[in-house]
Amino acid sequence: MFDCGLQNIFQLKSGQSRSINWENRNGEKGKGGMASSDLGPSRKGSPCIPKIEAGETVTLGEIQGEGIIQHIWITVTDRTSERNRYVLRDLVLRMYWDDEEDPSVECPLGDFFCCGFGVSYQVNSVPIAVNPTRGFNSYFPMPFRKNARITIENQCDEPIPAFFYQIDYCLTTVPEDAAYFHA
């Protein structure tokens, strides 16, 4: 049977939804939208990393407890200069489940979102969607039982400006037969 993710949409779910961005890296309840911005109070005043230096690894988020990541959204430039046109290959995404020392996910950012060779393409599928202006979306469910940590490493020899992201997850009981996500 084909499961496009809508088979159980009618069932009520339990859990606590949370969201992580640069301003609220631990998904604490009521801590998003705290920074001031030109849009006024409580308007996600700081949803982006201003700059990721060459060689730097940044923790995008850390989650404590049991739950499932439900959505990841990222947008970033695809080049820092004419010389560095492979930013989507130079940024390496890593995800760690339950105190792992080695990541379960270790992948160039573009490749993770079906945009190989450092080139951004429009993608329309159930688990991955990429819009024409590099709005990268993943809807793969990613369960964890104790904690989760997501990092991004800049392997480019130039800084990456304005890295925007949001990680949506639910603190909930993970079924015993749930498998970990790997890439």
Image (cartoon, rainbow, N blue to C red):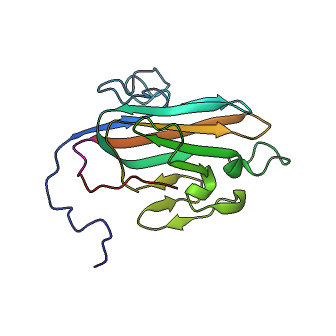
User: In x, y percent, where is residue 36?
Assistant: 46, 20
In this view, the residue in front, 98 or 129, is 98
Q: Seen in the image, is 24 located left or right of residue 6? A: right
Measured along the vertical axis of the image, is residue 139 above or below residue 40? below
Residue ID at (69%, 51%): 89
Q: Residue furthest bottom?
A: 1
The N terminus lies in quadrant: bottom left
Residue 62 seen in this snapshot: yes
Q: Residue furthest front?
A: 101
Measured along the vertical axis of the image, is residue 85 above or below residue 28? below
Q: Seen in the image, is 135 located left or right of residue 24? A: right
Measured along the vertical axis of the image, is residue 17 above or below residue 49? below
Residue 128 falls inside the magenta stretch: no
User: In x, y percent, where is residue 98?
Assistant: 39, 38
Q: Where are the magenta residues, as a range? A: 171-175
In this view, the residue in front, 125 or 156, is 156
Measured along the vertical axis of the image, is residue 23 above or below residue 143? above
In this view, the residue in front, 128 or 130, is 128
The number of callouts visible is 0
Residue ID at (62%, 63%): 121
Residue ID at (76%, 41%): 156
The image quadrant of residue 18 is top left
User: In x, y percent, where is residue 136?
Assistant: 53, 53
Is the stretch drawn in magenta largely helix, strand or loop?
A: loop
Q: Seen in the image, is 148 located left or right of residue 76? A: left
Residue 76 seen in this snapshot: no
User: In x, y percent, where is residue 86?
Assistant: 75, 51
Residue ID at (43%, 54%): 181
